[in-house]
């Protein structure tokens, strides 16, 4: 006699609360937070959907919401033939996704030594972990100056970051959490590489030419004062690492905090 077949149930299911589309390549969504999930702002988890064969298809996604939030936010690219995002882009309020509640990652305050200024260098969806870090009160307690650079190909791809900065700086909950004066520490520096905008160019070029520092009125980057977090494509991460090392900064980790940390943004 055959053993009875178990009805497939979605393991670690969370419910979609909200979906927002920005362009035909970018969207964000919020899901319920498991009551047992503890994470540090900047970390990532595995999320995904069930495949037709009933097996989960999971990818690493940075949590874009801060550690204190009741909901979990994610920011994603849509790749039309991407195994996960070709389907994930169609989720709606009330749908379920899989979320493995095992947060990890190096874009966390614990992996950096104390400093005066923190640089958050993002390209594309690499802004997601910094959306968490920028809504984390500790960021404003630990640093005198916080600089977010976000580089995208096109101007409309900056929308998620623009909304984020507006939400943080426009009086609401963040000013109650950290105080309005502390929010003045935050500087936003968006750039585009293929669309005309106020600030054009790859952040690596703008750093090497000295334009970024000149625009911000900063004399230099040094291991005494500056800390950095980098999140983008493999190429960006490699190139920026070289530049930061050239300024004398050393890469840190959870086990050995130092001056900068790097993580690859999810693609595909
Ligand atoms: P570019 O348009 O010059 O390639 P992508 O969508 O390919 O992930 O790129 C996101 C942004 O990151 C684009 O503006 C892109 O510029 C930029 N970028 C890609 N690779 C690098 C790199 N190695 N160094 C600096 N910026 C990069």
Image (cartoon, helix red, strand yellow):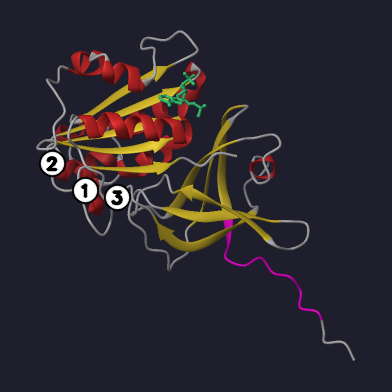
Residue 84, above or below 119: below
Structural distance between the alpha carbons of marks 3 and 2:
14 Å
Structural distance between the alpha carbons of marks 2 and 1:
8 Å
Q: Is residue 165 left or right of residue 114?
A: right
Q: Quadrant of residue 122?
A: top left
Residue 81, above or below 83: above
| Picture residue at 62% right of the left edge, 67% below the top | 11
Q: What residue sits right under mark 1 in the picture?
A: 112
Label total for image: 3
Q: Is residue 100 left or right of residue 164?
A: right
Cβ(mark 1) to ligand 1 < 8 Å?
no
Mark 2 residue element: loop
Of the 4 image quadrants, the one containing the C terminus is top right
**Residues packed near mark 3 inside 10 Å, few (<14), some (14 to 19) or many (20 plus):** many
Mark 3 residue element: loop
Q: Quadrant of residue 29?
A: top right
Q: Is residue 25 left or right of residue 129?
A: right
Extent of the magenta region: 5-15
Q: What residue sits right under mark 3 in the picture?
A: 108
Do the residues under discs 2 and 1 have CB atoms within 8 angstroms? yes
**Residue closest to the far bottom:** 1
Membership of 80 in magenta stretch:
no
Mark 1 residue element: loop
Q: Point out residue 40 in the picture as x, y percentages from the top left corner.
A: 33, 56
Front disc: 1 or 3: 1
């Amino acid at each position: 006699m055959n053993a009875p077949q178990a009805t497939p149930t979605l393991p670690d299911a969370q419910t979609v609360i909200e979906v927002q589309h920005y362009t035909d390549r970018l969207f964000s969504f919020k899901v319920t937070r498991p009551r047992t999930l503890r994470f540090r702002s900047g970390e990532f988890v595995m999320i995904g959907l069930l495949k037709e064969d009933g097996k989960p298809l999971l990818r690493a996604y940075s949590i874009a919401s801060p550690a204190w939030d009741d909901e979990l936010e994610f920011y994603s690219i849509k790749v039309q033939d991407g195994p996960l995002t070709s389907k994930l882009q169609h989720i709606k309020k009330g749908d379920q996704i899989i979320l493995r509640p095992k947060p990890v990652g190096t874009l966390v305050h614990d992996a950096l030594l104390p400093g005066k200024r923190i640089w958050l260098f993002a390209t594309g969806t690499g802004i997601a972990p910094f959306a968490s870090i920028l809504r984390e009160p500790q960021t404003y307690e630990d640093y005198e100056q916080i600089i977010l650079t976000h580089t995208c190909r096109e101007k409309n791809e900056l929308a998620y970051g623009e909304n984020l900065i507006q939400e943080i700086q426009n009086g609401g909950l963040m000013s109650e959490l950290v105080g309005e004066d502390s929010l003045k520490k935050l500087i936003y520096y968006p750039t585009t590489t293929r669309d005309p905008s106020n600030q054009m160019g790859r952040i690596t070029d703008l750093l090497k030419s000295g334009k970024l520092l000149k625009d911000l009125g900063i004399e230099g980057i040094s291991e005494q004062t500056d800390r950095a977090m980098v999140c983008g494509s493999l190429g960006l991460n490699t190139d920026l690492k070289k530049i930061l090392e050239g300024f004398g900064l050393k890469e840190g980790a959870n086990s050995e905090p130092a001056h900068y940390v790097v993580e690859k943004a999810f693609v595909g």
